[in-house]
Image: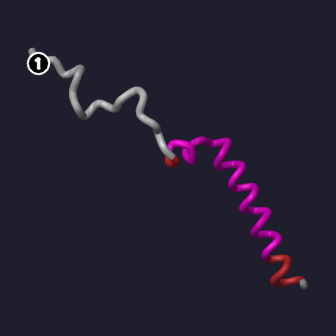
């Protein structure tokens, strides 16, 4: 039987995950959605009501 535990396709444990992993976290996405919503409301207020 062939040993497949040390294959090159397996991800390394100490490899940095990068920005896409950080953006996949729900608390960060909720925070960014709230900030984006506030910026959108402020922009619409400036454009339509002032």
Residue 31 position within the rendered picture, expressed as x and y whole percent measured from the top left: 72, 49
Residue at left offset 69%, top offset 54%:
32
Q: Is residue 39 left or right of residue 18?
A: right
Numbered marks: total = 1
The magenta stretch spans residue 36? yes
Q: Quadrant of the N terminus?
A: top left
Q: Main secondary structure of the magenta part?
A: helix
Residue 9 position within the rendered picture, expressed as x and y whole percent measured from the top left: 25, 34
Residue 30 position within the rendered picture, expressed as x and y whole percent measured from the top left: 69, 48
The span shown in magenta is 21-43
Residue 33 position within the rendered picture, expressed as x and y whole percent measured from the top left: 69, 56
The magenta stretch spans residue 22? yes
Secondary structure at badge 1 equals: loop
Q: How is the image coloured?
A: secondary structure
Q: Is residue 8 left or right of residue 27?
A: left
Residue at left offset 75%, top offset 57%:
35
Q: Quadrant of residue 43?
A: bottom right
Kindly identify which residue carries mark 1: 2
Residue at left offset 77%, top offset 66%:
39
């Amino acid at each position: 039987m062939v040993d497949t535990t040390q294959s090159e396709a397996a991800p390394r444990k100490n490899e940095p995950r990068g920005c896409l992993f950080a953006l996949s976290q729900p608390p960060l996405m909720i925070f960014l959605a709230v900030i984006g919503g506030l910026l959108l409301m402020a922009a619409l207020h400036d454009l339509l009501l002032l």
